[in-house]
Image: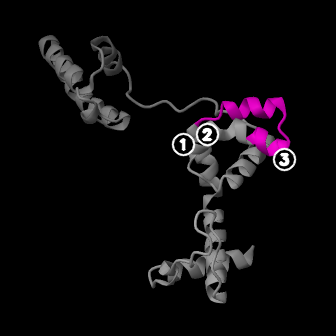
Amino acid sequence: MPAEDEMTIDERWKYLRKMRKRYVKADRNERGRLLDEMEAVTGLHRKSLIRLMDSELERKVRCTERGESYGPEVDDALRVIAESLDYICAERLTPNLVWMALHLAAHGEMVASPSVLDQLSSISVSRARQFYTARGRLLLAQKLKNVIILQASGLHRVDCNKAHRPVPKAINDSAYAPFVSQVVRALAAI
């Protein structure tokens, strides 16, 4: 089966639940044909399909949730590093965590203990994405507030790539107005 045509896990379970009804009612020869069909469609091994057809076909809930892998020191280090790199994407942030931590520690911006450096070296891209997702809404709101304040005052923002570039006018679009007013109200409440 080509990679682009593979079933998702939920689709596979749905298909197997439908086929189980036919499998239970079928005789021995028909079961063999159904197993051949399920094997071709799902890509699962025949013995796995037999085992699944004899079960309830319900996904099991995880017995115990995973604990936190990283402590507050690592989250704080990740926050400082991401902020210093201007919140680059997680794919670019992850390979640069250790050397940036050492660089910031050399300049006194953060404390880089060996345990923190070890944990920073093992952070995955998905963990960095989770960090951004958790802080993303607040950061977006803060950036929008800064843009609104700068635009209202008629100032230009300073960007490290293009100094004194005018603030984008897209924030004044009528499509953004309700969202911007909600953000401003939420920030005023903080």
Callout 3 secondary element: loop
First in sequence: mark 3 or mark 2? 2
Describe residue 43's horizontal placement relative to residue 149 as left or right: left
In this rendering, the answer to whether 35 lies above or below 185 is above
Kindly give the residue lying farthest to the bottom in the view shown: 153
Name the residue carrying label 2: 94
Pointer 2 local density, CA inside 10 Å: few below 14, some 14–19, many at least 20: many
Residue at 65%, 63% (x, y): give it: 139
Measured Cα–Cα span from mark 1 to mark 2: 6 Å
- Residue range of the region highlighted in magenta in the rendering: 101-124
Q: Position of residue 111 (x, y in %)?
A: 86, 42
Residue at 61%, 39% (x, y): give it: 94
Q: Amino acid at mark 2?
A: Thr
Nearest to the observer: residue 78 or residue 166? 166
Nearest to the observer: residue 76 or residue 86? 86
Describe residue 9's horizontal placement relative to residue 30 as left or right: right
